[in-house]
């Protein structure tokens, strides 16, 4: 798909904004909210270096790479490759979410992963963590001109690899459609995707969006749950102006700060563009990128390739 310069900047912003939120939030993770006005700065903390991204960005990268290579996320072979890359990453990663770790411990293929998360769901009924929403940012980049229903199906399939609960898939559908809308016309509209959810759950999600707009990010405790994480991220976006302040607001949610900020950053970055990411953050951003060296420049280049390959997504994948 041919994008204008500003649309191109916004598409790259979905990736860079998410990585920036991830790195900004990492040192604040697993602590209570620091309060509504506390300063939030890009710094080192815990096991994380200054500007270092975490699992949120690391797990988004194999999806972004598949798109950058012109692969279709509708192909099972592409999903197999993504799961295998996640499994390689998870072996040495400093942080892997609980549900994701359980699924990836044995899975080498997409079918293995789906079977593992379904078994976990049958055992515990708890597979609605925020770990698929945190990595959904790249999906829209490959489907900028696809029908809404196609993007919705693909976003859910990616979520279903590790999170069997349909709540996690619902969150990814809403967020991916909102990211695409933001890239294409700069609008922030989370409700537009409601029509792509199963009819029985639309009203529930519409109420959750209303609730997010009525409350502040730190009022959504339990943000390891996909619903609360999305509400906190959306609350941060609607209650602040500008990418830096939106990401700071997301970090102030406390608890799973890097993930809430990574989620907020994928959508806020899509609306505001890569050019809204401060230069000093861009210089420090780094993290796991497989065999490559992970930098902001790398993220930008992969995002640009994913968009350039986007037109090839329907049936002409080079798998
Ligand atoms: Mg993380």
Image (cartoon, grey):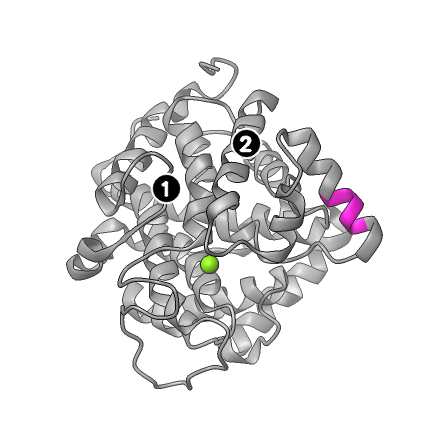
Is 120 magenta? The answer is yes
Q: Secondary structure at mark 2?
A: helix
Which is closer to the viewer, label 1 or label 2? 2
Is 29 magenta? The answer is no
Disc on res. 225: none
Alpha-carbon neighbours of circle 2 within 10 Å: few (<14), some, or many (≥20)?
Answer: some
Q: Quadrant of residue 244?
A: bottom left
Alpha-carbon neighbours of circle 1 within 10 Å: few (<14), some, or many (≥20)?
Answer: many
Which residue is pictured at 16% across the width and 61% down the height?
Answer: 280
Magenta residues: mostly which secondary structure?
helix
Which residue is pictured at 50% across the width and 23% down the height?
Answer: 72
Where residue 100 appears, as percent x and y from the top left, is 61, 49
Compared across the picture, whether 23 is left or right of 214 comes to left
Q: Depth check: 31 or 178 in front?
A: 31
Which residue is pictured at 41% across the width and 49% down the height?
Answer: 57
Mark yes or no: residue 216 visible. Answer: no
Residue beneath disc 2: 84
Which residue is pictured at 35% across the width and 86% down the height?
Answer: 37
Where residue 21 appears, as percent x and y from the top left, is 36, 61
Q: Depth check: 135 or 309 in front?
A: 135
Q: Quadrant of residue 306?
A: top left
Disc on res. 184: 1
Q: Depth check: 298 or 207 in front?
A: 298
| Magenta region, residue range | 117-121
Q: Secondary structure at mark 1?
A: helix
Q: How far apart, in angstroms, are the residues tagged by discs 1 and 2?
A: 32 Å
């Amino acid at each position: 798909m041919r994008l204008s310069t500003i649309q191109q900047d916004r598409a790259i912003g979905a990736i860079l904004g998410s990585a920036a939120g991830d790195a900004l939030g990492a040192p604040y993770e697993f602590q209570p909210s620091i309060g509504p006005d506390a300063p939030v700065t890009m710094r080192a903390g815990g096991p994380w270096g200054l500007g270092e991204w975490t699992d949120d960005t690391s797990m988004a990268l194999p999806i972004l790479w598949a798109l950058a290579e012109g692969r279709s996320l509708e192909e099972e072979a592409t999903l197999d490759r993504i799961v295998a890359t996640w499994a390689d990453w998870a072996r040495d990663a400093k942080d892997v979410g609980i549900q994701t770790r359980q699924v990836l411990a044995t899975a080498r293929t997409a079918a293995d992963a789906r079977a593992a998360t379904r078994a976990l769901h049958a055992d515990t009924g708890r597979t609605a963590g925020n770990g698929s929403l945190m990595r959904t940012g790249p999906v829209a980049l490959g489907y900028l001109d696809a029908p809404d229903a196609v993007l919705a199906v693909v976003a859910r399939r990616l979520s279903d690899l590790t999170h069997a609960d349909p709540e996690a898939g619902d969150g990814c559908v809403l967020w991916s459609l909102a990211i695409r809308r933001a890239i294409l016309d700069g609008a922030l509209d989370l409700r537009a995707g409601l029509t792509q959810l199963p009819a029985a759950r639309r009203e529930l999600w519409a109420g959750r969006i209303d609730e997010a707009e009525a409350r502040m990010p730190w009022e959504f405790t339990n943000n390891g749950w996909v619903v609360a994480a999305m509400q906190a991220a959306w609350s941060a976006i609607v209650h602040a102006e500008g990418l830096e302040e939106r990401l700071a607001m997301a970090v102030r949610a406390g608890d799973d700060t890097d993930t809430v900020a990574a989620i907020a950053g994928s959508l806020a970055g899509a609306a505001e563009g890569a050019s809204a990411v401060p230069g000093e953050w861009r210089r420090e951003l780094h993290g796991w990128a497989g065999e490559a060296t992970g930098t902001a420049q790398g993220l930008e280049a992969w995002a640009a390739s994913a968009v350039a390959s986007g037109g090839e997504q329907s049936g002409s994948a080079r798998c």
